[in-house]
Each structure stands twice: as structure tokens, then as C-alpha cells.
Amino acid sequence: MPTSRVSPGALRVAVVGGGPGGLYAAALLARQGHTVEVWERGAPDDTFGFGVVLSDETLGGIERADTLVYAALSAEFVRWDDVDVVHRGRMLTSGGHGFAAIGRRRLLQILHERCAGLGVRLRFRTAAPDVRDLAAAYDLVVAADGVHSAIREAGAAHYGPTLTPGRCRYIWLAADFAFESFRFEIAETEHGVMQLHAYPYARPSPDHHPSSGPSGPQNQFGASTVIVEMREEVWRAAGLDLCDEDESAARCAKIFSEALRGRPLHGNRSAWTRFDTLVNARWSHGNVALLGDAAHTAHFSIGSGTKLAVEDALALAEAVAAAEGDVPAALAAYEAARRPAVASTQRAAAASRAWFEEVAGYVDQPARQFAFNLLTRSRRVTHDNLRLRDERFTRAVERDFGCPDEHTPPMFTPLTLRGLTLRNRVVVSPMDMYSAADGVPGDFHLVHLGARALGGAALVMTEMVCVSAEGRITPGCAGLYTQEQAAAWQRITDFVHTSAPGTALGVQLGHAGRKGSTRVMWEGMDDPLPEGNWPLVAASPLPYRPGVSARPRALDQADLVALRSEFAAAAVRAADCGFDLLELHCAHGYLLSGFLSPLTNRRTDAYGGTLENRLRFPLEVFDAVRAVWPEDRPMTVRLSATDWAPGGTSPEEAVRIAAAFAAHGADAIDVSTGQVVADEAPEYGRSYQTPYADRIRNALGVPVIAVGAISSWDDVNSLLLAGRADLCALGRPHLYDPHWTLHAAADQSYEGPAAPWPAPYRAGRRKPPTGRG
């Protein structure tokens, strides 16, 4: 493939694929003076689907790039602001969202006309030549040939495509009338939950004449896209896997007859499809560029593939213009500009897709909370954003949640666990400081925990406090296995209770297991000590890092008895120190977590094998601690809800594990993930662990603490109102700003009792000026 710089001037461009993305790229490049040819296998009016939704951002880009296309689209767009959510027969409406849609066939007609006017050669019903021939004959080849791209597959070794399969089946259908707005509705059938997504793309008009095509002007009643979606097992149980297009349309129309006002649905070569998310490691090869669905896909619930393809076309044309004939430079700039935006959209789409896959777990939520949860599912719409769009709706959700008044944000609503009432929903997450001497917390811990206690959070957690010297991760880890350590901890609890009244201090008890005897984090995390090592124990004799970490000894029955006693003795000391809450650490690959995960527990006795057996010892420890911990003080359990590794703890197992601890008296589950095996592959991102907390909470009804890249007060409010968490634990934000909670209150103009400023700090409760006015 030629990759050399071509001389400035007109390029010879081949576009493979006559969908909206390919056509728009062709038009934009032709406007720059390039010679463009398009190959499309289908006829000019062939298309799948019905309406296309474009955002204001995309339309703004079109307007800047080509006012003629923008004007043609604007003349025919159907616009609406509302989202209607129907939950068990009750319709809730949220406004201010702003959508625009157009029939897919009409969109193609507009682009055909624009391309023809610009001299683009359109080859319909014509398969494109081999990509190698195109790359040799043209300066630039645009592969806009869809999700099943032949060009991408031919170069798969270079492009590196990966597909992540979804768990639902869906079908695109249409109704011959216009919904007033976007409508989402669930049907709870004998086979399971089914869901409808519908939106108008043609408004009623007496000037509209009936059309034989599914995407053009329909009739005087307008037209709507209707997508029906459900989990694969529901689809099969309902027998829809055996239905052809007409039967599927008739069945779906009957299921959602009320929403459709008794009218029929029809298809357009419609088939039940599973949505697979496509990611490519690279988007170009030589002078060939992938565009639209050939390069990436994002679930339809967050935005159309057409939207992404049009935005790709805009970016590609801009890059070509800027590169002045340097095709490789143009393609590098195109990918650099688009990849971050696409990745962000795909993350949001993945969260949205997962929400709809798990919608059956939300149907028991109150109607308004369900609607709020739906609207904020992708994390792109948040509590603060939704309040700007529709304050009335958001205030109603807040009242249902229990906010004391309209001036109190959700995060400053109290929560009671047993005899402990937390004044707000913010937790300072446990964070290892590696700054103790022989397990004794010193002045550093007093200042560190004291500062966070003064910072407004309702609950401040210690780092993992070890129940024995051999249970430490590093020599700098704190403990509660001697009276000297207990006295040092009491000094800290006394300070918090005296100087930050109303702040609760929690202790997290744990044992490092096979992850012990390592250097402190900043000297080499998980690296063994160069000297002075202590023997390790674990559920099974498996080193954490094979070839690097020491091999632990498998615990025998006598060891298990002794360990239960060590945990109980530490709990007694913690109670005497005055800690308000105790958390049992069963996560992150430490000792108790090592029993829970099938990757780290290979035992063949009563403590290994089935999940019930793997739970046995952690539950025995929990029971031993609960027996000595004061009845009125709550206990929580931290879990790794996934190991991020094949064969590890599954989300379904995590729910069962949480249920077992709740049945034994856990007052809340602190839901973390990973750090169980060294070869994990976490899917990092904003609030990336929250879906696991969400699943446990809505499956069991047990309070949960959400953790993991929660960084803004807006995220906290959103998670709470949506019913995905009861408390939010933040670590790094509290390292950056010990007064994070007080500053969150100030940012929201909240001055109530849930975020009191310490008397000596009250003069600083307003943000200082940043410069001259």
C-alpha cells in the first residue's frame, strides 16, 4: 500500500459503503476539490432501520462544514425535548433533553443529492474492487462498509478488532404514527422483562402522502422507530427466536399494544440481533481509513451509529484539509482527534447497554427513582445536569429519596445503620498509609485521620488494621494485636470524637494472607521484602506473583481456629478503643478474600470447592467478630465483586456472597473489585466499580457502599438518587483535599447540619477569590 506523501492538490478518493457516514465523507471531501467515487452494493433506496437521531453537537458540526446539508436536514427534522418513562402503568415525563430525528431513507436522499451536486460518482448495486487494488489506484480509501466490513476483516491482523457480545436481543421495527416524544416502557411478561424504545422521525402532516418505503414519509399520522429489546433467555423463552419478521412484529405489537394504541408494527428486513461492541486497535493502514461502524460501535441506547459515523466524516475531512496532501499525516490526525471522543462514547454506551441488560433488577424500584435511574444510566446525564434540564422532576425524585428539604442535596441526607446515624452519605475510603511502627499508629495517623474527620465526611475509615504481625502487608502496616496499638488507636478515636463531633470513625480489620511481607508501596508495590520476611499463609499454597512472591503455607484446621480468635480479639480491642463501625476485609486477595475466589482457593476439604464451602471460613470469622462487637454498632464487609480474570468470582456469585454475609448480620456491603490475582485486567473508568454495588443493592435490598473512581459530588448525588448506592466511599479525592465534603457543601450552597464546619474553620467556609474582579 502506498504511504508516501502525495503532492498538494486534488486527491483521488475511493469510498466503500454508501451509508450516511460514507456519503457525508464523500460530500465533504468533494467540497475540498478532491475527486471522489463511492461504491455501494445496494440500491439507492436500500436501507435498514427507520429513523436516525442526531445530537445538537453533531448538527453544529454539520452546519459549520456544509450549510446546504444542514439546511436540508433542518427543514425535515422532528424535534422533541421530553422523555416518557412508563413504569408499571405509570408514565413519568422528564423534559429539557433535546432530540432531533429524520427518516433514514430521507437522510440518504439528501446526501445523494448533495454528492451528485458536488460531482461525486455514485456506483450503486456495485461491489467495490479489492482493497489492495483500491489502495494502489487511489490516494485515499475510506472504508465505510459497516460493522461487517470486508476491508477491516481483510486487514484484521493490522486493525486488531475485538467484539464484546451483549446479553440482549433486539429488533428494529416501525409504527405508522408519531409518538409525542421518546418513550421507554417495560413489559413484565411470564417469560421475563421486555422493553420498548420508541421515538418519532416523521410528524403528522396532511401534506404527507403514503409511501411504500419504511423510511420515507409514511402517511398523515407520521412515523416512529420502535425497538424491542430483551435478555436472550427471555427472547428464547417467549419463542421469539422461532418467529420470522412478520410474526415478530405482530408479537411485539401485541405485547406493547397500549403504547402503540392498538396499531401494528412493521419491519424493514428486520431481524432479531445481538448488539456486539466493536473496538479496533488501529483505524488506518497505509492510505486506508476505517469510518463509522467499520471502526467502532456503540449501543443504540446512547446514540445512533449514524451520529458517530457523521462525526467521523467531519473529523476525517478536517484532517485531510489540514494535512495538505499528506495522507498518512491526515489519517494519524483523524484517529488522534476522534479516538478519545469515540472511547468516551463507547464507555457511556457500555454502561447504558449494561443497564438495559440488567433492567429486570430495577423494576421494583419506585417509579420516579426508576425513571431517574434510566435517565442517568450512562453517567453522561447527572443529577446536577438533570436538575438544569427539568428541575421539577428532579425535585420530586429528591423528595422521594428523603432529602429533608429542597436546600439539602441527596448526599447530605442522613442514613442509619443499627444504632449509628451517619449525618451524610460520604465515606473516607480505607487507604493504606504504610506509616506505622511495629503496628503502632503514630502522629501521622492522628493527623491523617483527624484531618479527614474535620473535613466533613460522615464516616472516616482506617486503613486495613491487621490482626497479627504475620497478617501485615508491609512492616509499615498498622495492627490491633497488642495493647500498645490499642492505646494508640484510642488516642485517635478520642481526638475524632472530641474535635469532630458527629463524625464516625470506622476500623477495617483484615489479614494480608499471601500478599504479605512486601515492601511499602512507594518502594515497590507487591515486591517481597529484601530481608526480614515473615512466613505467609493462605487458603491454598499459591504465590500471588508466581516466580516473585513467596509461596504461602495452606492453613490447616488449627490455623483456622487461631485466626478466628485473632480476629475476635482485635474486634474486642477495637470496641474498647471506641470505634463506631467495624468492617471485615474480605476483598483484594487478602486472606479472607483468598477463600472466596475460585482462583485462589483450591482446597479439597470443607473450606474449598463450592461457593458455599468457600464462604465457610469467612462467615465463621464474621460470626466470631459479630459475637464480640457491640450489638448497637454496625458491621460492614468489603468484597471484591469480580476478580477481573477468567474463572474468577462472577457477578452472580458476588450477589450470593453478599447475601450470605447479610444473612449473618452484615449491615452494609462495601463493594470493591479486583486485586485478587496479579494477572487481572480491570475495565477502568469513571465510577467503574459502581455497577457491582448497584447489582447487589437492587438484587438483595441490602445497603451498599460504592467505591472506585467516584470523584465528584455530582456523581455521589446521582448514584444515591438512582438507587445504585447508599453510601459513597472516596479515597484519592480525600488525599487531594481533606475537606472534600465541606467543599462539596460549599459548592452546592449547602450550610445545613449534615456538613458542619469546625468552629476554628468557619471563617474559611466560602471559597476565596482567585484574582482581581
Image: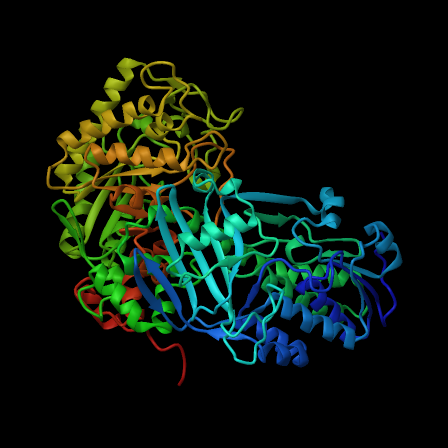
Q: What is the quadrant of the C terminus in the image?
A: bottom left
Which residue occupies 59% across, 53% down?
A: 297
Residue 342 lies in quadrant = bottom right
Which residue occupies 73% across, 64% down?
A: 44
**393 left or right, relative to 529:** left
**32 left or right, relative to 236:** right
Answer yes or no: is residue 580 visible. Answer: yes
Which residue occupies 47% across, 65% down?
A: 199
Q: Residue 257, how many percent across, how many down? A: 40, 57
Residue 499 lies in quadrant = bottom left
Q: Residue 753, how many percent across, how many down? A: 16, 64
Q: Residue 170, how many percent across, how many down? A: 51, 50
Give whichever of 314, 242 is nearer the camera: 242
Is residue 76 shown above or below 539? below
Total residue callouts: 0
Q: Residue 275, how many percent across, how many down? A: 55, 48
Give whichever of 373, 664 is nearer the camera: 373
